[in-house]
Image (tube, helix red, strand yellow):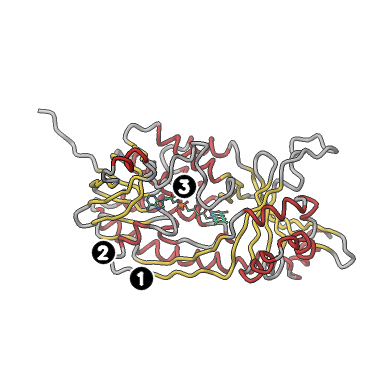
Amino acid sequence: MAQIINRQKTVIIGAGPVGTLAALYAAQRGDDVEVYELRSDLRDPSTIPLNFTKSINLALSERGINAMRQSGRPAILDKIFSETIPMKGRMIHGKTASGELYEQSQEYDVHGKAIYAVDRGGLNKALLDELEAMPNVKVIFNHKLTGADFKARKAWFEIIGSTALQNTGRNREIEIDFDFMIGADGAHSAARYHLMKYSRMDYQQEYIDTLWCEFQIEAKPVPARKDKESRFWISPNHLHIWPGKDFMFIAIPSFDGSFTCTLFMPSSNFSKLEAQPSKVPEFFDTHFPGVTNLIIPPDLISSFNQNPHLPLINIKCQPHHFSDSIVIVGDAAHAMVPFYGQGMNAGLEDIRILFEFLDKHSSRQEALDEYSDYRKADAHVINDLALQNYVEMRSSVVSPIYAARKWLEET
Ligand code: FAD
């Protein structure tokens, strides 16, 4: 008689970068995988990216690259790398005492290693495409986790935006069961909220007094240049920083020649400019010299007015799991401020390490106990480093130490 093998049903909450990578790892191990995502498919052009105006560019580093390399589907990296740009250092922009604009390159690594500018949406789409090619994965969009019982292993989802259901007045909620849940539903995680009712979780959340707003340097061919990088107005191989001591403006290259830029500033400075948006170009000329040559003043004002001014949250919690039924990963477990460029990278690394522990132990309970314990220390440290690096980026990069190092390099 043929033996019936019960495959484990792994349910992932959230189809962001971390949830989709988790689905890939679980599917590679033969689980029946279901991914539930609150929003519609981001590959559909009508889907508006959460919190972001266009598409945000992120710094992808070895931590995240290695997690994708170890997924068992390393070809995914070819797709992602085809549209990334290596950033070998940061470029500090300023003005000399005599009023001349200057740029100073500070390399990240003596051996020339780089981090990579990647389109977050592009990376996420590549992971979703890879999942679609796997027969044991279902990605279910427009489903919001609303409740979970981690002892009975049941979860409830609201079906979002189904007018057909709204009109019939039928129940818009579904119930599912699962063997194992991975909560990858971001900083405001519903999985974490429900997990807290089961686990004696220590939880700490902090909003820093900084908001962020996105701007864009458009791709414009530089007429005087004919080389392949002529579509970039400033160096494509740097993360550009205009340090302002208490605030900063940064620019990350995009493959099409544009740059995604972000203003990070205390809320009180935002309030002052919100009251007088016409002063935005003057503010930039005073604090971020040269930017108005790259973004014309009307565009600076309209981006400031139209793009959201968003908060930054830092979350620490422990443990990250309950029994052998749920674990949280990525921003759900350790949302951090973006100044170390490691939020997504650390989330991707969670998946590599989580599955290393799951592979090592025959008991999932033991694997999760060890994972939670092991990951807590690293997650807390990287959150702290991210906070500290804000001071480095907005202020210390113009310290005399860097100036001296530059002088030594040039002499
Ligand atoms: P998310 O990307 O938040 O994805 C969570 C998913 O879960 C979403 O698709 C959401 O719709 C879904 N979801 C939410 N609630 C539910 C629910 N109830 N039910 C079902 N689905 C749900 N990181 C880097 O590594 N490098 C960088 O350079 C970098 N720069 C950044 C710059 C800025 C300005 C910001 C704000 C962040 C930056 N980050 C960076 C951090 C990075 O964006 C996050 O760490 C990363 O997106 C986290 O991925 P995630 O999959 O854990 O969560």
Looking at the picture, which amino acid does disc 2 mark?
A: Tyr
**First-in-chain label (1 vs 3):** 3
Question: Quadrant of residue 94 in the image?
Answer: bottom right
Cβ of mark 3 under 8 Å from ligand 1: the answer is yes
The residue tagged with tag 1: helix, strand or loop?
Answer: strand
Q: CA distance from mark 1 to mark 3?
A: 26 Å
Looking at the picture, does residue 17 appear above or below residue 151?
A: above
> Can you say which quadrant of the picture contains the C terminus?
bottom right
Cβ–Cβ under 8 Å for marks 2 and 1:
no
Q: Whole-percent x and y of residue 369?
A: 29, 61
Residue corresponding to mark 3: 17
Q: Whole-percent x and y of residue 108?
A: 66, 56
Q: Quick one: which residue is furthest to the left in this view?
A: 1
Which residue is pictured at 45% across the width and 63% down the height?
Answer: 378
**First-in-chain label (2 vs 3):** 3
Cβ–Cβ under 8 Å for marks 2 and 3:
no
Residue corresponding to mark 2: 198
Which residue is pictured at 79% across the width and 65% down the height?
Answer: 286
Question: Quadrant of residue 403 in the image?
Answer: bottom right
Looking at the picture, which amino acid does disc 1 mark?
A: Asp
Structural crowding at the residue carrying mark 1, measured as other residues with C-alpha within 10 Å and reported as few (<14), some (14–19) or many (≥20): few
Q: Whole-percent x and y of residue 323?
A: 24, 59
The residue tagged with tag 3: helix, strand or loop?
Answer: helix
Q: Is residue 224 visible?
A: yes
The residue tagged with tag 2: helix, strand or loop?
Answer: loop
**183 sits to left or right of 397:** left
Looking at the picture, which amino acid does disc 3 mark?
A: Pro
Which residue is pictured at 34% across the width and 62% down the height?
Answer: 193
Q: Quick one: which residue is furthest to the top in this view?
A: 1
Residue corresponding to mark 1: 202
Q: CA distance from mark 2 to mark 3?
A: 26 Å
